[in-house]
Image: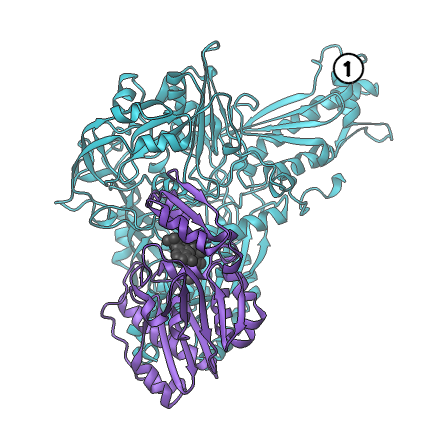
Chain colours: A cyan, B purple
């Protein structure tokens, strides 16, 4: 059993309950005497609220209460916070305008929260909400990120002049300018990283509950990080002591980042529960998810790459305008800065890099971390500009990348943008990917496609990401308001079963399988005797949650540290039981042995002795229950190469992805099947961004045009090819598992691979995402009028 | 959703009765369009008259040289029908290309045409195949049935009972789906019957329309080459984030040629 746990594709233990409909999602929870909340949302992108008349709604059937911004203000409920303070180029903190859970006197995006109706049923709450009369004074709106800084643009916040949140930079500008001055060739590129709407399968939901006897609250929330939510709710928003608040995040159906944040709805439900003395439940309708979940990406970038005669990169210069939406969401500011600009070296030994990022407010939903968070934006621009450079210099794109890779003997490698990569072998992944994609045979395949009137293209993407988020001292020095360690607890029972408590949270990542596998291997306990507990602040030690591909690298490492403590204590118990000295006890996979003998004690025997300490070391505490906190020494650096091959129909512009190769280096892999699943999902989202998905607001009215699946195009199974997934392995050097993280890789790697392939097929330098059939057709028409006119 | 009275008649006559008696009644067929509309509170009918229990409205018959499909027949039944597959394979293909399995099992031909969604597939079939719509009170030629954007020849309380399709010699439907909704961005039905050719286009304009110039050219020479040079004007065509009018006009040509090619 224990021998083969690491690296075994064990079936997901959580699947039984999910596939048989026995999961417990938030909407499955109903509390005694509960009432329902419905949020009245702003129909306008930007307006002053002259008055709100709730009288008719108050007296509507079934209505328990109606609250507006005035009630929130009267109770001194705090605003939603941004937990990461970015310091700008001039040493000033970013502008964080007030973000009230219910609008005070102005609404700033379609979907902004105006009032809440609490009633016996959702339908009654909704009926009553229609009776609320709001007198709006319309204001001009700006929804276009590229235009937010223009001189005559409508202004969102008095305390953020010019709609500027911060003007930030990273890197050595003088060194970059000097390198450009002596460059042999400069490639320039303007690109947009299109705004996306996350679309988790389970919409956000919350129940607030107040226990008057204990003066304590419970907040059920679809959260990726219940303790962080508790911290924000207590210390910043509601002013409740932390020990008087329990946050429960049960089975959560996908988050992709959007459920990291503290939102108005859970604040209002929790606050209102005390006001109405009944549990208050809210579940988003899909339309509300589109309007009010934090969106992702939204960068407008100009980049320049300087090279010498041989195509060696000399310097990279990046100017980005990043949309924040109407207010700052919980981690919005770190995404375009410390999760983006710090990755601009990519896999390359570019000696000088400078990035300037201006974050701006627009009359749109808040923007925050979405699968990859900053790293897809960095990878997209690097891998696009490198591709363009290869075409301009007429160097094979694989070869140009190879020439510029950081070599294995250069690790640990200090990039010019703050990070130190610990390990990697980029050429190994490239070679494997080229082989798997039969790169050498592409010309023949292209010729064959041409015969059939199709345009064929191939595109590479060599990505890197910083995961295992994150060393607390480092992020603290950069403005993070929290530490980003993780906790883990391993608790044996007298009969030898194990409960694992983790501060990270599974909402699709398979923690219950992977963590059980990891600890089964370390402690020699069969998987079926292990349960993984997460998502309830009353059960688990304080934890920081799941995002940034951190669960295994950080949360798993905490568990390994706890396992070390179990083994250390177990040795003392085993030594006592076998009348040997502790120094003579060897441990391996669940067995304690007196060195050089066949005398052994099993983990189960040791656990029993710990709880029934009839024969037990005098100076040792009973019990076998250990907790560890793990703060990583560095980020981890998953990297790899994806290759996309497409066939384009010149008649319609339709892109058919005919092949996809992903070769990833995630360090040590615990469960390859789970990892492959994460890779597949990530690529699907990356293909979604490159080909299909786009969040569109009407430029005049600020209405969300893509507010349903009729217009927001999610990838479907038949949009996707069968993925060929390969792996290389350079174990992470600084955590006890050697794992790097795999959750975001696909979403980071895929978009540039696909756009590189499509532009290669058409024979153009660039095309903005998503590459819709019409855009592709228009591009073909411009480059080869004859073909498209057919 | 607002409250409404729910009726489940077992005959067309009773359904008509209920509809006439209601203050603001609506027919409920598959509910694939109507239910979301109610949920979004874009409509608030006083009464819903569900056709689901009227046996005579469901089924496919091969009679009198026509294929007749009951109004409440779901798309899946048309797609899987042996007789439709044999006699008008283009119609089975079209039905198979509507939405997803859930939608095909609920959505009905009557609901589809009564709704006259500009991007729906069936209107191209009805007009392209020269079908006749039967209602509780009259017969309407497909050419006269579709009036405009979400507009048909149906009166307030008129119920579609069936659609009859003559048997073509050849017919093919080529659809370019909207990437997001998978409705037709452009769908073209080309059919030849008794020497005459019909070309009907859905998705491109506010309502299904025919292309007389292509019909004429194809009547003389039923091959893709015959319509190669025919320019489709973008005037009056739909334009949205998924495709401009010019792109749709281009797709009409491409899909028409593909439909003709597939007929060979
Ligand atoms: C996700 C999704 C994808 C879809 N994709 C496609 C697609 O690709 N192509 C396509 O063509 N369609 C598509 N549809 C539409 C679907 O196929 C149905 O045809 C359509 O929703 C209406 O049919 P229904 O039977 O559900 O009618 P309902 O929604 O019940 O009714 C629609 C309207 O027609 C009226 N009505 C219904 N039956 C009659 C009758 N017999 N007489 C008079 N009036 C009547 C109703 O009162 C109502 O106003 C899709 C729908 C969904 C939800």
Where's residue A762, x and y in %?
37, 71
Q: Quadrant of residue B236?
A: bottom left
Q: Chain of mark 1?
A: A
Of A440 and A364, the residue lying toward us: A364
Q: In the shown orientation, is residue B66 left or right of residue B40?
A: right
Tell me if residue A617 comes above or below residue B242 in the rendering.
Answer: above
Where's residue A775, x and y in %?
32, 65
**Which quadrant of the figure contains the C terminus of chain A?**
bottom left
Of A27 and A173, the residue lying toward us: A27
Q: Residue under circle 1? A: A612
**Which quadrant of the figure contains the N terminus of chain A?**
top right
Q: How many marks?
A: 1
The quadrant where ligand 1 appears is bottom left
Q: Quadrant of residue B124?
A: bottom left
Where's residue A233, x and y in %?
40, 23
Q: In the shown orientation, is residue A14 left or right of residue A770?
A: right
Of B90 and B7, the residue lying toward us: B7
């Amino acid at each position: 059993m224990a021998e083969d746990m690491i690296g075994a594709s064990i079936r997901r233990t959580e699947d039984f309950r999910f596939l048989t409909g026995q999961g417990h999602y938030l909407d499955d929870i109903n509390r005694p005497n509960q009432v329902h909340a419905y949020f009245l949302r702003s129909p306008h992108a930007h307006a002053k609220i002259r008055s709100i008349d709730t009288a008719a709604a108050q007296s509507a059937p079934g209505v328990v209460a109606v609250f507006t911004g005035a009630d929130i203000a009267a109770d001194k409920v705090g605003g939603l916070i941004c937990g990461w303070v970015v310091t700008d180029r001039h040493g000033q903190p970013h502008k964080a305008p007030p973000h009230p859970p219910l609008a005070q006197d102005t609404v700033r995006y379609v979907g902004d929260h105006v009032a809440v109706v609490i009633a016996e049923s959702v339908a009654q709450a909704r009926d009553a909400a229609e009776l609320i009369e709001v007198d709006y004074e319309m204001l001009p709106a700006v929804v276009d990120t590229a235009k937010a800084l223009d001189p005559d643009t409508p202004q969102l916040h008095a305390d953020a002049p010019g709609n500027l949140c911060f003007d930030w930079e990273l890197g050595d500008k003088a060194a970059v300018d000097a390198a450009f001055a002596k460059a042999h060739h400069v490639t320039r590129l303007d690109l947009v990283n299109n705004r996306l709407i996350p679309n988790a399968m389970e919409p956000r939901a919350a129940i607030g509950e107040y226990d008057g006897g204990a003066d304590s609250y419970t907040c059920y929330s679809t959260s990726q990080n219940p303790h962080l939510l508790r911290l924000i709710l207590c210390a910043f928003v509601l002013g409740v002591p932390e020990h008087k608040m329990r946050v429960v995040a049960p089975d959560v159906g996908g988050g992709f980042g959007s459920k990291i944040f503290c939102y108005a709805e859970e604040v209002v439900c929790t606050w209102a529960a005390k006001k109405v003395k009944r549990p208050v439940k809210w579940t988003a309708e899909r339309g509300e998810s589109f309007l009010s979940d934090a969106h992702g990406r939204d960068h407008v970038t100009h980049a320049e790459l300087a090279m010498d005669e041989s195509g060696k990169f000399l310097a990279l210069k990046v100017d980005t305008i990043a949309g924040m939406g109407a207010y700052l969401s919980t981690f919005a500011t770190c995404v375009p800065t410390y999760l983006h600009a710090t990755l601009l070296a990519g896999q390359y030994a570019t000696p000088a890099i400078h990035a300037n990022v201006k974050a701006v407010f627009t009359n749109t939903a808040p923007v925050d971390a979405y699968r990859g968070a900053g790293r897809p934006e960095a990878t997209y621009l690097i891998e696009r500009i490198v591709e363009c450079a290869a075409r301009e210099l007429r160097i094979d794109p694989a070869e140009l990348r190879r020439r510029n890779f950081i070599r294995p003997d250069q690790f640990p490698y200090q990039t010019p943008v703050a990070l130190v990569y610990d390990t990697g072998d980029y050429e190994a992944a490239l070679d494997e990917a080229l082989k798997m994609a039969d790169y050498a045979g592409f010309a023949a395949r292209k010729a064959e496609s041409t015969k059939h009137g199709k345009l064929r293209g191939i595109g590479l993407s060599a990505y890197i990401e910083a995961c295992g988020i994150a060393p607390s001292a480092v992020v603290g020095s950069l403005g993070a308001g929290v530490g980003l360690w993780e906790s883990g607890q391993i608790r044996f029972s007298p009969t030898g079963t194990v409960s694992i408590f983790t501060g990270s949270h599974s909402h699709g990542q398979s923690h219950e399988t992977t963590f059980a596998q990891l600890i089964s291997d370390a402690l020699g306990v069969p998987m079926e005797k292990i349960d993984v507990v997460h998502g309830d602040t009353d059960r688990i030690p304080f934890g920081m949650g799941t995002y940034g591909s951190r669960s295994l690298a950080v949360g798993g490492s905490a568990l390994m540290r706890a396992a070390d403590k179990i083994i250390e204590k177990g040795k003392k118990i085993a030594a006592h039981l076998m009348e040997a000295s502790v120094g003579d006890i060897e441990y391996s996979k669940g067995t304690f042995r007196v060195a050089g003998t066949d005398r052994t004690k099993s983990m189960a025997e040791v656990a029993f002795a710990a709880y029934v300490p009839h024969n037990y070391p005098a100076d040792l505490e009973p019990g076998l229950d250990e907790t560890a906190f793990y703060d990583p020494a560095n980020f981890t650096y998953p990297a790899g190469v994806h290759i996309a091959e497409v066939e384009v129909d010149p008649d319609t512009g339709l892109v058919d992805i005919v092949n996809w190769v992903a070769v990833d280096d995630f360090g040590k892999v615990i469960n390859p099947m789970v990892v492959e699943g994460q890779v597949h999902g990530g690529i699907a989202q990356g293909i979604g961004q490159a080909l299909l998905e786009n969040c569109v607001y009407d430029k005049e009215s600020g209405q969300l045009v893509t507010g349903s699946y009729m217009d927001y195009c999610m990838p479907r199974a038949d949009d996707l090819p069968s993925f060929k997934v390969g792996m290389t392995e350079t174990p992470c050097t600084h955590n006890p598992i050697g794992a790097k993280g795999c959750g975001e890789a696909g979403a980071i790697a895929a978009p540039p691979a696909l756009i590189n392939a499509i532009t290669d097929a058409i024979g153009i330098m660039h095309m903005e995402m998503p590459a819709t059939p019409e855009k592709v057709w228009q591009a073909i028409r411009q480059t080869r009028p004859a073909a498209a006119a057919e | 959703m607002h409250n409404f009275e729910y009726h489940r008649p077992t005959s067309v006559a009773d359904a008509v009765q209920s509809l006439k008696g209601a203050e603001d009644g609506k027919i409920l067929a598959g509910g694939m369009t109507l239910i979301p509309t109610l949920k979004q509170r874009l409509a608030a009918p006083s009464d819903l008259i569900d056709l689901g229990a009227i046996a005579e409205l469901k089924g496919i018959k091969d009679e009198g040289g026509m294929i007749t499909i009951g109004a409440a027949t779901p798309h899946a039944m048309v797609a899987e029908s042996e007789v439709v597959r044999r006699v008008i394979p283009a119609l089975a293909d079209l039905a198979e290309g509507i939405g997803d399995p859930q939608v095909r099992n609920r959505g009905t031909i009557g609901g589809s045409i009564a709704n006259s969604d500009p991007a729906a597939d069936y209107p191209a079939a009805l007009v392209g195949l020269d079908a006749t719509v039967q209602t509780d009170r009259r017969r309407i030629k497909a050419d006269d049935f579709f009036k405009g954007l979400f507009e048909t020849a149906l009166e307030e309380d008129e119920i579609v009972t069936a659609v009859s399709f003559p048997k073509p010699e050849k017919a093919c439907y080529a659809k370019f789906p909207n990437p997001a909704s998978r409705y037709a961005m452009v769908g073209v039905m080309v059919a030849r019957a008794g020497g005459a050719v019909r070309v009907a286009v859905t998705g491109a304009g506010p309502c299904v329309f025919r292309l007389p110039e292509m019909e004429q050219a194809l009547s003389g020479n039923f091959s893709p080459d015959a319509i190669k040079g025919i320019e489709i004007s973008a005037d009056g065509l739909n334009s949205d984030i998924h495709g401009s009018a010019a792109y749709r006009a281009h797709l009409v040509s491409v899909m028409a040629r593909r439909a003709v090619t597939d007929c060979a």
